[in-house]
Image (cartoon, rainbow, N blue to C red):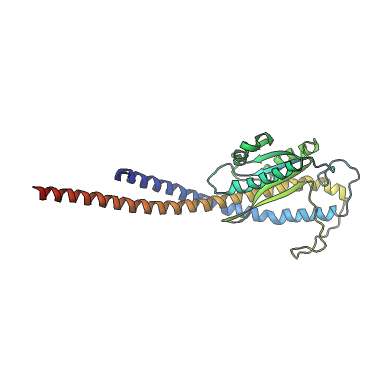
Amino acid sequence: MPSLDDLKKRIGSVKSTQKITKAMKMVAAAKLRRAQESAEASRPYSESMEDLITSISSGYAPSSKERNLLTGDEKDSTYLLMLFTSERGLCGGFNSIVTKSVREKIASLEDAGKVVKIICVGKKGFDILKRQHSEKVIETIDMRAIKSVTFQDAKNISDKIIKMFFDSEFDKCLIFYNKFKSVISQIPTEQQIVPIEIINEGNDSDGHDNAFFEFEPSESEILDELLPLNFAIQIFKALLESAASEQGARMSAMDNASRNASDMINNLTLFYNRSRQAVITKELIEIISGAEAV
């Protein structure tokens, strides 16, 4: 049974931890608002870009079978998986949920006899995968020095990946990230960005009219400019969604931690009071027994 001094120290320690979790919750809440606004603002642009490319490519056939970002080159033996996670922990299941999706994809691709390569954007993804798949991770992109994600950050990543594609280092590229839904809900998302998945829909399932565009100059010239731009935009969207999801998950995790600390403090305080009362009662009994003996 712990002594009263030990219980006092334990209560003080939990109170100090609670102060930290409350402070982290407030910081995450402040960062979340800006990150959420950025993520939600990026969605219409990235979706319109996808609609535009879908509209152009629906009636377009490449003049040669050379490898390109729209159709690839009909090979699918090597897959590049890009995993977007955080640089820091204390954000609940944010990293483990999306990493689980990557693990399942790796297993299914290996069962099909495919070669898998991984790029981790964020340190925590590599920390989780390194035990089983360290040999597949070809690069870990450090984002610790970046306080606020910009389009240039996404473009730097996309330029590197596009070069790898044209150097025939992979045939298909998929990105995995958490899409922000709410503070308590982040959706693990898988998206193929090379070659682009073209969805031919006669009727839009969401009830939206299909986008229609007239093109000038030619479709091939437009695609030469749009495809690399779209690649960077989709990565930028993944970075923004992941950043917003991280802050939401951290805010929720720190709120739960603060609540748990409050419960622990109440339980320890109750146990401390009972123990103190038991000590006082024991001393009184000893005093009374001694007086009666005299």
- Where is residue 50 shown, x and y percent of the image? 77, 53
Give the percent coordinates (x, y) of residue 220. 87, 48
Compare residues 45 and 217 and report the one nearer the observer.
45
The residue lying at 80 percent from left, 61 percent from top is 210
Asked whether residue 112 is in view, the answer is: yes
- Quadrant of residue 69 in the image? top right
Residue 149 placement, left or right of 258: right
Judged from this view, the residue extending furthest toward the top is: 135
> What's the residue at 45%, 52% (across, down)?
260
Residue in the foreground of this view, choosing between 110 and 171: 110
Image spot of residue 95 (x, y percent): 60, 46
Q: Can residue 141 be seen in this view?
A: no
> Residue at image x 37%, y 53%?
267
Q: Which residue is drawn at 30% across and 44% down?
A: 3
Residue 17, given in percent of the width and then of the height, sits at 43, 46
Q: Is residue 143 above or below residue 46?
A: above
Q: Is residue 220 above or below residue 118?
A: below
Furthest residue toward right: 63
Q: Is 289 left, or right, of 42 in this rendering?
A: left
Q: In which quarter of the image is the N terminus?
A: top left
**Residue 116 or residue 239, whichever sits in front:** 116
Instruction: Tell me: 60 left or right of 36.
Output: right
